[in-house]
């Protein structure tokens, strides 16, 4: 399985999430593509491909961090602790 982590370089929430995301990647043996969107227009366009899913999952907000599972297009938005991140990952495709 692959996940996409859309983040902003200076985003404090993203910085706090990075170690949690790295831990999940190691424990679940999943590939996580990290895409910085604040300073790269092409990357921002990649994030926009999931705009409707991000808006829906985030209660109308569009920002980072946003973690996306591309095949199901499921999204975890905003800062989450490891427990929440793990729960979200385990629920992908089961809802």
Image (cartoon, rainbow, N blue to C red):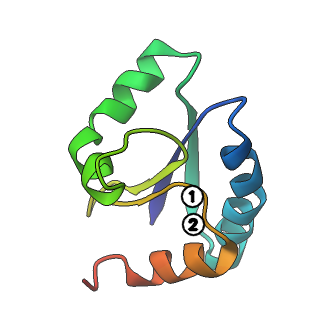
Residue 20 found in image quarter:
bottom right
Relative image position of residue 65 (x, y in whole percent) = 55, 47
Secondary structure under tag 1 reads strand
How crowded pointer 2 is (Cα within 10 Å; few <14, some 14-19, many 20+) is rated as few
Residue reaching furthest left? 52
Q: Of residues 80 and 42, which is closer to you in this image?
A: 80
On the picture, is 73 further left or further right than 92? Answer: left
Relative image position of residue 91 (x, y in whole percent) = 39, 83
Circles 1 and 2: CB atoms closer than 8 Å: yes
Q: Quadrant of the C terminus?
A: bottom left
Q: Of residues 2 and 41, which is closer to you in this image?
A: 41
Relative image position of residue 56 (x, y in whole percent) = 25, 54
Residue visible at 69% across and 29% down in the picture: 9
Q: Quadrant of the N terminus?
A: bottom left
Residue visible at 72% across and 53% down in the picture: 18
- Label ID, residue 31: 1
Q: Cα distance, mark 1 to mark 2?
A: 4 Å
Residue visible at 32% across and 49% down in the picture: 54
Q: Compared to 79, does 34 lie above or below? A: above
Q: Compared to 90, does 4 lie above or below? A: above
On the picture, is 36 further left or further right than 45? Answer: right
Secondary structure under tag 2 reads loop
Relative image position of residue 12 (x, y in whole percent) = 73, 42
Residue visible at 65% across and 66% down in the picture: 25
Q: Compared to 91, does 50 lie above or below? A: above
How many numbered circles are shown? 2
How crowded pointer 1 is (Cα within 10 Å; few <14, some 14-19, many 20+) is rated as some
Q: Compared to 28, does 16 lie above or below? A: above
Residue 76 found in image quarter:
bottom left
- Label ID, residue 57: none
Per the image, the residue denoted by label 2 is 30
């Amino acid at each position: 399985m692959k996940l996409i982590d859309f983040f902003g370089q200076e985003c404090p929430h993203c910085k706090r999430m990075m170690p949690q995301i790295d831990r999940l990647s190691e424990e679940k043996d999943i590939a996580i593509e990290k895409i910085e969107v604040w300073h790269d227009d092409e990357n921002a366009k990649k994030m926009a491909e999931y705009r409707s899913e991000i808006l829906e999952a985030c209660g109308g907000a569009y920002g980072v961090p946003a973690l996306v599972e591309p095949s199901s297009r499921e999204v975890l938005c905003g800062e989450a602790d490891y427990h929440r991140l793990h729960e979200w990952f385990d629920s992908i495709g089961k809802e």
